Image (tube, grey):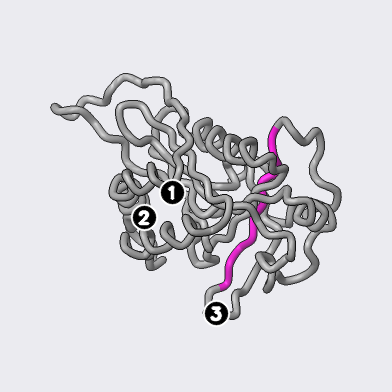
Amino acid sequence: MTADARQTQSRKPAGGRPSAVAPVRLRRLNRRQVEGVREDLADLYAESRATEPGDAYLRPSRQSFLNRLTTDMRRPGFAMVIGETDGLMGCAFGFPVRGDGSWWFGLAGTLPHGIGQLMVSGGVFAFGAIMIRPHPQDRSLARRVQERLLTDHRASLGATLVDRADGPTPAAIRSWGWQDIGELHRRAGPTTFRALVLPGGERTAARPAGLVTMPGSGGPGGV
């Protein structure tokens, strides 16, 4: 499981004029509802993964995204929140992390003690994707959909993995409050990931014990 955190080009009405900024409403989708918007989600994904000039990172295909979505939907506790106006503005989805520690296998170094405590108590939620369409409050929307998933699952910490070769994504999600805790390697393939965590907003007056910002991560809100 890896996270995608990219921003897409805003849609414009006929004539090319940007539409007025409309309030973005959040909506929780069940599995049946997700099935009904799979193609819209794939469109959002494909647009968000468009290769930038000079960016050599090979992005997974639209079908790869749909396959990964299908896999995540089968996991216990799967949840998705979307942000919408007259169209899809963004989404985030994921599932609770199991308390046996298997999600963290391959992490270089020692898992911060506070994360281990939260994991055992079921307080960690893994994000499979975060995709936000650019608009004047895109960072605010990213934080809202993240916090909504954590709140709905009474989780105190979000977790995600990002391909180390995908340079822009860690910078994007760090600007949304995520913290880098090191590298992680899965035995199933050659890919090395960055492991990032997201302390739950207002529910945690302080960071979980043992959670520190790694050198060069930029810390919360950094880029």
Amino acid bearing label 3: Ala
Nearest-to-viewer mark from 3 and 2: 3
* First in residue order: circle 3 vs circle 2: 2
Q: Please tell me whether residue 71 belongs to the stretch shown in magenta.
A: no
User: What's the magenta region?
Assistant: 192-201
Q: Residue at x 67, y 55 (%)?
A: 180
By secondary structure, the bulk of the magenta-drawn segment is best described as strand
Left/right placement of residue 29 relative to residue 104 reads: left
* First in residue order: circle 2 vs circle 1: 1
State the residue in front, 84 or 36. 36
Left/right placement of residue 4 relative to residue 107 reads: left
Classify mark 3: helix, strand or loop: loop
* First in residue order: circle 3 vs circle 1: 1
Q: Which residue is mark 2?
A: 49
**Mark 3 to mark 1 CA distance (whole Å):** 25 Å
Q: Position of residue 151 (x, y in %)?
A: 64, 36
**Mark 3 to mark 2 CA distance (whole Å):** 24 Å
Q: Residue at x 49, y 44 (%)?
A: 80
State the residue in front, 115 or 78. 78
**Mark 2 to mark 1 CA distance (whole Å):** 7 Å
Is mark 3 in CB contact (under 8 Å) with mark 1? no
Q: Please tell me whether residue 196 belongs to the stretch shown in magenta.
A: yes
Classify mark 1: helix, strand or loop: strand
Amino acid bearing label 2: Arg
Amino acid bearing label 1: Arg
Q: Which residue is mark 1?
A: 6
Q: Height in image: 15 above or below 209?
A: above
State the residue in front, 178 or 35. 35
Is mark 2 in CB contact (under 8 Å) with mark 1? yes
Q: Residues within 10 Å of mark 1 (few under 14, many from 20)?
A: many
Q: Which residue is mark 3?
A: 188
